[in-house]
Image (cartoon, rainbow, N blue to C red):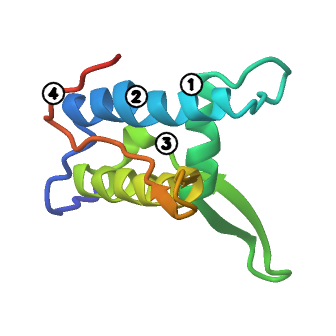
Amino acid sequence: VEVCIREKRYYTSNPQRGYYWGVVVFLIGERMRSDGVTGPYGGPITDQEVHELLAAKFLRVSVCVDLDTGECVDYVKSTAKLTTREMSEYIEAVKAWALEMYSRERHNDDGTTTVVPFGIPEANKQITFV
């Protein structure tokens, strides 16, 4: 018999999942589609493919499968198995990446340039689509 005592883990919450899929993945997917990004199977990239791309970028870990040879295999963690803290950190990393990746320069009539940031609203904020 083995008994393991550890601090209770709280996994990704429904509000986190809703915000991630309904706001973060949706807005990044919309920008990718407007930029003409295609999915791996052709056609516009889907929200599921955006999620898989983000997970591969930010949730990839390397697991050593042979200690003698040092061979390692990359593994992508599931967002469903992240703790609430890990999910929050993941979402913040994705948002920071999207801000850097999708902010645009706008050339003004007076010859100046303004950076238009790619904004993802904070969780629990009212979102209006126009």
C-alpha separation, residue under disc 1 versus residue under disc 3: 16 Å
> Going by the image, does 124 lie left or right of 32?
left
For mark 2, what is the residue?
21
Q: Quadrant of residue 39?
A: top right
On the rendered image, what quadrant is the C terminus found in?
Answer: top left
At 22% from the left and 59% from the top, the residue drawn is 3
Q: Do the residues labelled 4 and 2 touch (CB within 8 Å)?
A: no
Report the amino acid beneath label 3. Ser
Report the amino acid beneath label 1. Asp
Q: Quadrant of residue 22?
A: top left
For mark 3, what is the residue?
78
On the rendered image, what quadrant is the N terminus found in?
Answer: bottom left
Residue 40, image x, y percentages: 82, 30
Mark in front: 4 vs 1: 4
Residue 8, image x, y percentages: 14, 53
C-alpha separation, residue under disc 4 versus residue under disc 1: 21 Å
Residue 47: mark: 1
Report the amino acid beneath label 4. Gln
Mark in front: 4 vs 3: 4
